Image: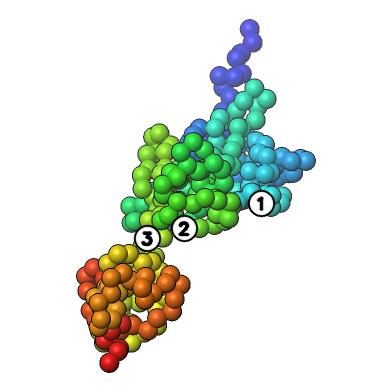
Amino acid sequence: MSADLSKDYSPSRDEFAAMLADSLAKDDLFEGSVVKGKVVGIEKDLAVIDVGLKMEGRVPVKEFGIGGQPGNIKVGDVVEVYLERIENALGEAVLSRDKARREESWTRLEKLSEKGEKVTGVIFNKVKGGFTVDLDGAVAFLPGSQVDIRPVRDIGPLMHQPQQFQILKMDRRRGNIVVSRRSVLEETRAEQRADIVARLAEGQIIDGLVKNITDYGAFIDLGGIDGLLHVTDMAWRRVNHPSEILNVGDTVKVQIIRINPETQRISLGMKQLQS
């Protein structure tokens, strides 16, 4: 009668240590998580990534490119990839660099959104009602009304150019991000206006450009901010309409009569410079 040797078998210390290490390593690999792996080979347009436990997966090299640029990786590089499945029918791990970038971007963008900070992105496609923006891996929607302060006829010059956006809304569960370029421009313009107003003073004489003419006066561009030259302050004589004295595009010398620091409205006069 032969004895069942398997019952009496006990692993050596080294074998037990290896089995324990394997068990602990498996706990670190979760499907649906971002893991670190090492590039162990490049096969044509595929990078072979070892994520541990003698498991390898293949990821298109192009997924390691940023902003449409080709991927630049080499054997030995340590990269982060998204583990979709630990093993497929071929016995390989199913990995994705795109999804890893997306996860990284969402985490980073959520922190920036909480602080109200601006984010950098690239407009790369036109869709119904607006455009899509690549925020370094996460795709956001830019409504047409949020592209610029004024309607934009040709979006071409803005495409594929890194620029700043403000996050209006984020919903990770639905995968939705809405951004605005307009709010960034409005904030910049407000800062510029405040800076210009701070350099102006009541009584100051300044050159300006006639920007627009209305029945009650003319708007004068003072180098980034407009001032109103009322028809009653154009001349000591009666002026029926501003067009009697001014034309759009004229350069005129005016005096700053009043500055409202709260509304940043500037009142101008021409007759005050006349005898």
- What residue sits right under mark 3 in the picture? 186
**Is 121 situated left or right of 149 in this image?**
right
- What residue sits right under mark 1 in the picture? 69
CA gap, disc 1 to disc 2?
20 Å
Q: Which element carries disc 3, helix, strand or loop?
A: helix
Work out which quarter of the rendered image holds the C terminus and state it.
bottom left
Answer with the quarter of the image where residue 261 lies.
Answer: bottom left
Which numbered circle lies on residue 164? 2
Image spot of residue 75 (x, y percent): 71, 50
- Is 235 above or below relative to 174? below
Instruction: Pick whichever of labels 1 and 2 is earlier in the sequence.
Output: 1
Mark 3 neighbour class, 10 Å CA radius: few under 14, some 14 to 19, many 20 or more: few
Answer with the quarter of the image where residue 126 lies.
Answer: top right
Image spot of residue 43 (x, y percent): 76, 40
Image spot of residue 116 (x, y percent): 34, 56
Answer with the quarter of the image where residue 148 lies.
Answer: bottom left
Amino acid at pointer 3 = Glu
Mark 2 or 3, which is nearer the eye? 3
Amino acid at pointer 2 = Gln
Residue 80, can we see it?
no
